[in-house]
Amino acid sequence: MMLIILLWILLISLFTIFGAYYARKFNRPDALIGLYVSFVLISNILAVKIALFDFGIISFTATAATLIFSVTFLITDIVNEKFGRKETQKMILIAFISQIAATFFIWMAISLPSASFWSGQEVFTQMFGLVPRIIFASWIAFLISENADAYIFSWFKRKTNGRHLWMRNAFSSIPSMALDTGIFVAIAFYGAQPLLPLILGIIAIKWLVAIVDIPFMYLSREIMNR
């Protein structure tokens, strides 16, 4: 588990540095938008698996996508910090449209007749059949929580006159993550999984990520403004 966490921190460092450097060099959020959309889409697929996050002294159950989707709030804040709320909301809209496309193509792939020599239809349907429901839940939770994060971040930035980056990063992400989790789990897993352990586990992991994200936020700002 600790090896996975260390690899996750390494990858987030590399993605953050790349996105921030690209934003500084070209003064455009393209790379950050690409990473954001990729993380959102892969999260909708990986959310099918319920994983055990064992930290030794305490353990949580959460979707396998939790660590990945949590980073979208960091990217939202980075884009908001550099390019403002309107550009952030454009990015959220692009990701939303991408999820609609993904839902259609997954449904189409499941519905296509199988070749006579291919025996994986049952497993394929079992793995991806829940994805459209997960994506539908993600649409609702995503639009509400990501826009809430963008608004809260902008509000804190105005109130603090651009100071205390850690405050607007943490206090925009933490309530937005809780809001996202409650809505998403209730819609995606009602009747299929126990809801309360999932909600508590996902919130705990996301809040941990929100704290870990703070130095990455400062690193990104330093790179973009250098």
Image (tube, rainbow, N blue to C red):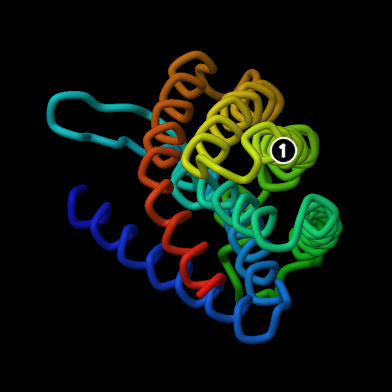
Mark 1 residue crowding within 10 angstroms, few (<14) / some (14–19) / many (20+): few
Percent of width and height locating residue 209: 41, 41
Q: Nearer the viewer, residue 96 or 145?
A: 145
Q: Residue at x 32, y 58 (%)?
A: 9
The number of numbered discs placed on residues in the rendered structure image is 1
Residue at 45% x, 39% y is 210
Quadrant for residue 26, please give it: bottom right
Left or right: 16 as drawn, with respect to 189:
left
Q: What residue is rendered at 55% in x and 30% in y?
A: 171
In the depicted structure, whether residue 212 falls above or below residue 54: below
Residue to which mark 1 is pinned: 158
Residue 170 placement (x, y as % from top left): 50, 35
Residue 188 lies, in percent from the top left, at 67, 31
Side (left or right) of 35 relative to 98: left
Q: Residue furthest left?
A: 56
Q: In the depicted view, which residue is nearer to us: 82 or 8?
A: 82
* Residue type, label 1: Arg
Vertical position of residue 76 compared to residue 159: above or below: below
Quick check: 173 left or right of 3? right
What residue do we see at 25% from left, 27% from top? 59
Would you say 7 lies left or right of 127 here? left
Mark 1: secondary structure? helix
Q: Position of residue 189 (x, y in %)?
A: 62, 27
Residue reaching furthest to the front: 161
